[in-house]
Every structure is written in structure tokens, then in C-alpha cells.
Amino acid sequence: MTRKVAAQLIDVLEDLRQELPSKPRSGDWESKRVVVKERLRKLPDLVEKAAGMIQIVPGPGRPHTADLAKRTMLFLFARLMQKSNRDMEDLLVLFGPLFHLDVSYKSIERLYSDEDVKMVLHNLFLLLLQEEGVSGHTAGDGTGYGMSVTRHYSSDPRKHGRTYRYAFRLIDLQTGMYVGVGFSLQSEMEAFHEAMEMARPRGIKSIRLDRYYSSLKVLHKLAGMEIFVIPKKNLSRIGLPWARLLNRIASNPLAYLLEYFQRNLSENGFSSDKARFGWMVHQKREDRQRTALFSIAVLHNLFYVRATG
């Protein structure tokens, strides 16, 4: 595999990309809403199970006014409502009989840094994957969340600096559920590596990524997986991983692209997440920002339905 042959293959892929539709066709999404309702019915039991997996040793300080499962349900409810903490305090007066809690807006904000709640959310994330069953065939992409209403990730060409928090989410193609998530203050690449470490124990058979992750270093990290990525045009160093991938492309460019295009499921997931759960991070502390973005992945796995086969 020479550089000249590699460049010709990349040109062939580019020509095919222009001719093929880049988005999968939509299926009958509404008929699958029953799946979401069933997940929501099971949620209180799953949260109880997730909390029961944690052994907590009482320490110094004032004890919590609510048990761990109730605090987690309150946190998820607050995230789903997308209201300020003060508005949530008022709403809980109305929904008091549901939670049997009397909390202040400060108590709601502290849930974002409650280590026990974080552990329950992590366990809940894993339980939801076990309930659904995932295929191991994945796609991934990164995105950013703004820190203020004046800086929107889709309209700001810079997309870096203190105005953004980065997330990478690895989505299962069969179920549409996230199997790995990462967070970073610095870059999508840093978030990518964190998400891969989280997802790897569950087994990844194949992965689809965009050109940003098209490097020899990343390919080495993904050894053992079937990789679908479009090489960069200025590919200078081939190496064994690139040679293997380019030979697969050469054998059937069309089939390769059709697999690669399933990466669009990641973009669909980001769009639905930001429409439903917001595109901003309101928390100021880094640990609370991480919890806020991780909770979006948990809520996604509760509400998302894979509409296409």
C-alpha cells in the first residue's frame, strides 16, 4: 500500500460520498414509544437496585434528609424539568407528595456533587444497558455545551476555550443507547479517550468515527475492533493499521461507506439530547458540570428509541 494508492482510494471515497445519501431513513418512531414508557415504569425499581449496590458507611456531619434512591430520583426529575434550582424549589411544593421531600434550591444544586448520587447514576447507566442488551457495533462523535446563552456551539466557529465543555458519546447502533461517555474541559479528543475507557469492558466489535479521529495513534488505540473512518487527505505515514484499513476500502468502497454513514446516528442522538435536555451547562464547578453532562447520557438511554433498522 503506497501513498499514491492511498490518495487514489481516498478520492474514490470522496466521490462516492457526494453520490450517496448521508442520513439513514427514518422508521415508524411513534410505534416504539411504548418502549420508553416501559423504561420509565421500571425506573424507580432500577434506581432502588442501583442504590442497593452501594454500601455506605456513615461518616461525620449532618445526615441526609432523604435516602439515596429518593435523592437520585429528585436529581433526575430536576434535570428533566430543565428549570433553575429556585424554580425547582417552587415546583417541589406542587410535587411534594411525589417525593415526600422539603428541600431548598441549594439542596438541589448540592446533588450535582453528591458522590453517592453519582455512584447510583453510574450503576443506573450500566443497569439500563443490561436491560436493553447492546450489540457492540458502535459509532462515536464529540460535541460541546455552551456556558452562556451568548455562545452557542453550532454557531461559534472557534469551539474552544472557557466558553465550552466537551463531551464524547459512543452510541450502540442496534439500540441507540450510549455505551461510553467522556467529559473534558480541553478538547473532544480527551473526552474521546475517557469514553473509550468506559466502554471497552463491555466489548466493542466495530466503531465508526469522523476524520477528527483519523490518526495512526487513534488506530493503535482501537486495535482489535473493526474500524470505519475516512482517512485524512494528507495521509503521509501509512503503517500497518492504515494498510489494513485501506485494503478493506479497496475491496469494496461502497460497502465501507454504507457502514461509515451509520455514524450519523451519533449526530441524531446529539440533536435529540440538546432539544430535550438543553444545550447549556449551568453549573460552575467542574465536578458538577461533569455530573450534569453524564446525567444527559443516562436520560438519553431512558428516552431514546432506535427508529431505523
Image: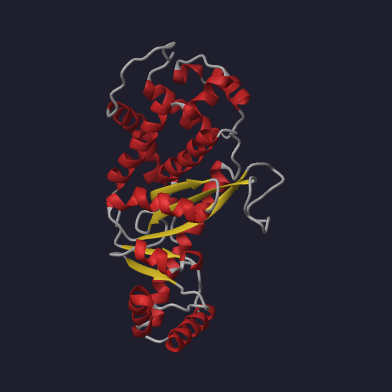
Whether residue 80 can be seen here: no
- Percent position of residue 56, x then y: 31, 21
* Res. 84 image quadrant: top right
- Percent position of residue 89, x then y: 58, 20
- Percent position of residue 45, x then y: 32, 30
- Percent position of residue 119, x then y: 37, 32
> Does 251 sit above or below residue 61?
below
Q: How is the image coloured?
A: secondary structure
Residue nearer the viewer, 238 or 99: 238
The residue at the point 50 percent across, 30 percent down is 112
Residue nearer the viewer, 68 or 246: 246
> Does 273 sit above or below residue 239?
above
**From the viewer's perspective, is 145 left or right of 133?**
right
Give the total number of marks visible in the rendering: 0
Q: Quadrant of the N terminus?
A: bottom left
Q: Quadrant of the C terminus?
A: bottom left
> Does 257 sit above or below residue 152?
below
Residue nearer the viewer, 106 or 66: 106
**From the viewer's perspective, is 86 left or right of 35?**
right
Residue nearer the viewer, 66 or 282: 282
The residue at the point 48 percent across, 66 percent down is 210
In the image, farthest residue toward the right: 150
Whether residue 34 can be seen here: yes
